[in-house]
Amino acid sequence: MSGTSAFPGGHPETVSAALAQLAAEGYTADFSSRASDLHCQTCGKGHTAEGAQVQKIYRFEGASDPDDQAIVLGLRCPECGAKGVLVSGYGPSTDAGEIAFILSLVDGR
């Protein structure tokens, strides 16, 4: 997998490397996506794509298998200020609703 980043400071080659880099930068909380909202595991609040604060984006593409696509987002919770990550598949087998929500997060930043 090769990684691309919307931010300077290096392009991690793997999802694990991206997560390690984000953790070193203080992105230690977990976020999850549920239907049409982003859920902060720290404060338990849900946020719409418009309310989410996307600060880092890393996209990974599989070298030979489109199902290996993934996206890693570095986020800040607008409610409690926690910095954390959301990891999602991004390939053809990913749920269309999940892809639409991830795209709305990325487009909303």
Image (spheres, grey):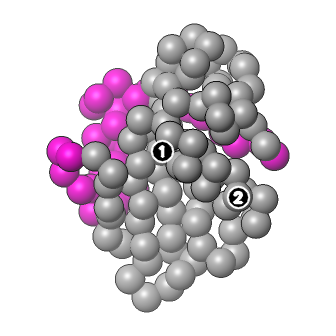
Which residue: 72% across, 33% down? 48
Foreground disc of the pair 1, 2: 2
View extreme (top): residue: 80
Question: Looking at the image, is mark 1 or mark 2 earlier in the sequence?
Answer: 1
Residue 16 seen in this snapshot: no
- Give me the C-alpha separation between circle 1 and circle 2: 15 Å
Q: Tell whether 82 sits left or right of 89.
A: left
Residue 47 seen in this snapshot: yes
Q: Label 2 neighbourhood size at 10 Å, few (<14), some (14-19), many (20+)? A: few
Q: Which residues are magenta?
A: 8-35
Establish if 38 lies above or below 99: above
Q: Amino acid at mark 1?
A: Leu
Q: Nearer the viewer, residue 33 or 16?
A: 33
Instruction: Report which residue position mark 1 lands on.
Output: 73
* Quadrant position of residue 41: top right
Which residue: 53% across, 81% down? 66
Magenta stretch contains residue 16: yes
View extreme (left): residue: 9
Instruction: Report which residue position mark 2 lands on.
Output: 100
Q: Tell whether 1 sits left or right of 79.
A: left
How far from the left and from the top, in percent, is residue 102?
Answer: 62, 52
How far from the left and from the top, in percent, is residue 40?
Answer: 64, 26
Q: Nearer the viewer, residue 83 or 108?
A: 108
Q: Tell whether 35 sits left or right of 90.
A: right
